[in-house]
Amino acid sequence: MSYAICELTAIPLRAEASHRSEMVSQLLFGEMAEVIRHEKEWLLLRSLYDQYEGWCWKKQVRLLDNEEGMALREKSTAVVTDLFGEAQSTRRNILLCAGASLLAFDPKQGTFQLGDEKFHTAVSVTHAQSGTHPERITWYALKFAGLPYLWGGRTPFGFDCSGFTQVVMKMVGVQLPRDAWQQAEQGLLIPFFQQAQPGDLAFFEDDDGRIVHTGLILPGQQIIHASGYVRIDPIDHYGIFDMASGRYSHRLRLIRRFL
């Protein structure tokens, strides 16, 4: 088995082996993937973080052999919590964004290692932890308010709905799958809207009953979600109410708690 690691700020994973193909997700800096298949200049990758598959241009990742890949998988990981930051090595500067993974991070020195390359950074990070207070989740989520929507996006340059919730939860040590319908199968089911708390995830259905949207519940019966942009709207037992149009934009299906 061989592996790949993202050494750029973020790279696209595409539905097919073509630059013209839609972006279905992204790998963030420091995230690793299994290499499933080679096809000319393209690699079919399976992300180790969420098992999502997509095609990546071979020039945008560093390939690892099995031994190196397995060793990196055992390294402790810190997650960037600033919207953007910078890291420097003797070879280059790299832009980091929220959700990036820093392997073998030394908080005292502000350093992390990628292969034989040592980086220095002053970004804020967090480590995987349990018992995170919901206030911290909502604080992280609100950092992204006003940022653009992007299909397949997982960065402050653009999020889709489930990419947004996945990255926010990554920042507090909760590992979620990639798509909204997959996320809706995890966590603790909250049976009534009145029992929902800030930090819970709400999931919404289309006319066929399929989970097609998600967002994070805020205090005061509000929700932050990526729809056109990362926005804050009122929510009740029926769904998300769009103040501009005067109607409900998304119909509530269920609520899940992850902490």
Image (tube, rainbow, N blue to C red):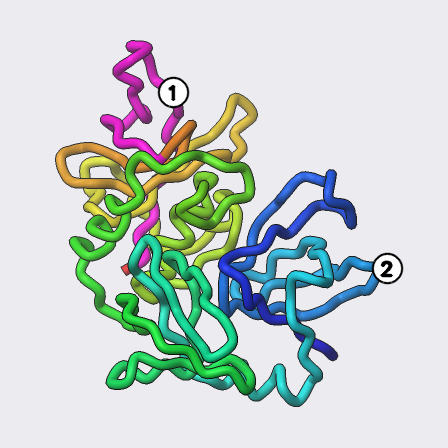
Task: Examine the image and state in which quarter residue 151 appears.
Answer: top right
Q: Is residue 204 above or below residue 249?
A: below
Question: What is the quadrant of the C terminus in the image?
Answer: bottom left
Q: Nearer the viewer, residue 22 or 172?
A: 22
- Whether residue 88 is visible to the viewer of this picture, yes or no, is yes
| Residue type marked 1 | Ser
Q: Is residue 245 above or below residue 82?
A: above
Query: Which amino acid lies under the numbered mark 2 shown in the image of this protein?
Result: Lys
Residue 131, image x and y in percent?
22, 68
Q: Earlier in the sequence, mark 2 or mark 1?
A: 2
Q: Residue at x 72, y 40 (%)?
A: 21
The percent coordinates of residue 192 (x first, y second) are 26, 38
Residue depicted at x 46% and y 64%: 94
Element at label 1: strand
Quadrant showing the N terminus: bottom right
**In front here: 147 or 192?**
147
Left or right of 210, for residue 68: right
Q: How would you rate the neighbour count of disc 2 (Cα within 10 Å): few for under 14, some for 14-19, many for 20 or more?
A: few
Marks 2 and 1, Cα distance to the nearest angstrom?
43 Å
Magenta region, residue range: 230-258
Q: Is 32 one of the magenta-colored residues?
A: no
Residue assigned mark 1: 249
Which residue, as the protein is rendered here, is positioned at the far left? Answer: 220
Mark 2 lies on residue:
40
Say if 219 sits above or below 231 in the image: below
